[in-house]
Image (cartoon, rainbow, N blue to C red):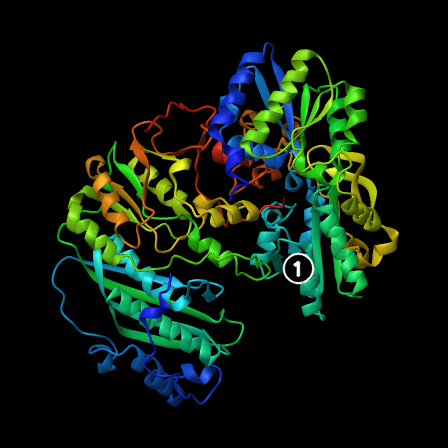
Amino acid sequence: MKFLSEYRDPELAQEYVKELHRITTRPWTLMEICGGQTHSLVKNGILDMLPKNITMVHGPGCPVCVTSVSVIDEAVWLAEQSNVILCSFGDMLRVPGSKKSLLEAKASGADVRILYSPLEAVELAKQNPNKQVVFFAVGFETTAPANALSVVHAAQQEITNYSILASHVLVPPAMEAILSDKENIIDAFLAAGHVCTIMGMEEYYPVAEKYQIPIVVTGFEPVDLLQGILMAVKQLEKGVFEVENQYARSVLREGNLMAQQTIQKVFEVSDRVWRGIGSIPQSGYEVNEKYKSFNARLKFNIDIPFAEENKECISGDIMKGLKKPKQCSNFGNKCKPEHPLGAPMVSSEGACAAYYHYSVASEDVTINIF
Amino acid sequence: MTDTTTFQLSCPMPKFDFDVITLGHGSGGLLTHRLLQSGVFDVLKNELLDQQHDGASFELNGRTAFSTDSYVISPIFFPGGNIGELAIYGTVNDLAMCGAAAKYLSLSFIIEEGLSMEAFWTILNGIKQAVNKSGVSIVTGDTKVVEKGKGDQIFINTSGIGIIHPNAAIHHNRISVGDKIILSGNLAQHGIAIMSKRQGLTFETDIVSDTINLNHTIKLLLDLLGNKIKFLRDPTRGGLASVLNELAELRKLGFVIEQSLIPMDEQVEGACEMLGLDPLYVANEGLFVAIVAADAADAAIELLHKDANGINACIIGEVTATHPGKVMMKSSIGGHRIVGYLTGEQLPRIC
């Protein structure tokens, strides 16, 4: 299988590391947008291989982490309705709501199913005509096309017992929110490769121009990340700010037009509350007027009180890159994956969980066993 | 993997009165009697079972190991085996990890009413095949039937006893700095075979479970290397990471492994990537971890490579004085990471 090994080639990785050490003359702070990138950086031990004056901060690109407590409460409420099968991507299940997580709701008897694709939920609705099947449609622009497509399929087949609880979030508004924050410390971005596969790169040119910041669209394998970091640092050292594409094997400048059309067919851009960051205008997708009969919020008339987030969790500072997970006083003691205070400790893409599971930054790493 | 060519059913499926298991089959009455007579006893017959008493009586000589496990796997039929074979191999292997050759097993079914007779028959024959292959006898058992919705088709419990190899000295206390960590074959094979057939997760692969008995392989290892084999464990639920973490914690030593040395089937590796699962936490069957004295490690590998269950065996790491209580992995590109315990169930990632 040649789609993994060449992107994990130790010699190539070492070459990039050497080149980074050679060209870096000043301290730089880079933010990788996507939680998948954070995960890969930590899992492969890349952070320890970078020059000391390059700091990676971990952006808001984990859909699990940025989904607000209130939305989790909505999902739990839906799951607890007697006639509902609530379907979700796996790692949303452990995220704490204000009272409980979906996993706890499941343990108390709610019918919660883990699926890999929303199209499976449509099938499930077909097989269970007497039940209401709701898909918990979270994620960035990456998961939006498939979620939209599930609605289109259900509409075409006149399946009336299917709906989605949409909580989509969009990357460019979040980047702008971070850049316009007066405490911003970010010198360059590694944009999320999968998001750009769908949406293309056009949205990033005005951002790079306005904030004079290099943006490198980057993949997820170790060699991708090292090359993306190298491309960004090269720009910083030269004093330029361009949008570049490291992940050209997947990302076209215009993106995937068919996927974009599907999104536009079903969703409209809306304001969205981000966990830890707050409300960002025009930063999410909601089901549009035409498909409103597939909007679970309207269908079930969900009306539950707005829930405050756990004040002890500093997820906002983590996701804006102002603090590292290990700088949180609750990290590893009051807050662990088995009892998370906030979402970044839950998801495998969450910065806190990634540090908790894999990071050896504070350890002695002189290992040479063979 | 099931070798179907070595085993032929001695008789066709018996004519039962029902197409499915009903509550009556667990009542202890006539239906139970028929199910046992023309099913279980006939298929699994041996001298001790044939006594059809409340328990089995026998004599044992030597130090004895005793183990029990319950099998609740879904789906009950998977590529490379079924719940019946798993229930036998699982307990045989747990005993093997104690250095014991399994001898007698108990077998208990908890069946959800509605299970088809055909499925039950197939499972029973899987059990027979596993029993023959492992060289053990089922000597006592039980059958209960629960109402529809109170179980998940069929649950099986097996317990077993076996005589410990005279040269075996397996205990985590014996693990010391410098010992080598051996993995007997490809990682994550079983878990991914199961995942590939779970509802809603069908993807095209020919990955099959590695479920198999390890008792004969372990005997060969102990015959040759005796107390140089310091510890054995099959990394079933929780996977390799959990086994190593338990040992690191118990012994307050470091367990350092190297990613590039861990044997994995390419398809399994790809499936793990696609599903967002870390193979270190995926369940295995028919696989074991051996902690072996450094001077015996090469001999162990040489022996394993000649055995069908150890063709892909590798030294994947060693026990160190540094990083006490922790499992470390050198990544394939040269970085390092901690390998921690799995928290709860391993949940697939969003994207």
Tag 1, which secondary structure? Answer: helix
- Crowding at dot 1, Cα within 10 Å, few <14 / some 14-19 / many 20+, comes out as some
Is residue A216 left or right of B321 when viewed as pictured? right
Q: Chain of mark 1?
A: A
Residue type at mark 1 is Glu
Residue at image point 54% right, 36% down: A353
The residue labelled by disc 1 is A120
Is residue A50 left or right of B101 when viewed as pictured? right
Nearest the camera: A285 or A190?
Answer: A190
Residue at image point 52% right, 25% down: A47
Residue A135 position in % (x across, y down): 70, 55
Residue at image point 32% right, 48% down: B184
Q: Residue furthest right?
A: A289
Residue A241 position in % (x across, y down): 73, 18
Q: In this orientation, does residue B99 appear?
A: no
Residue at image point 64% right, 21% down: A231
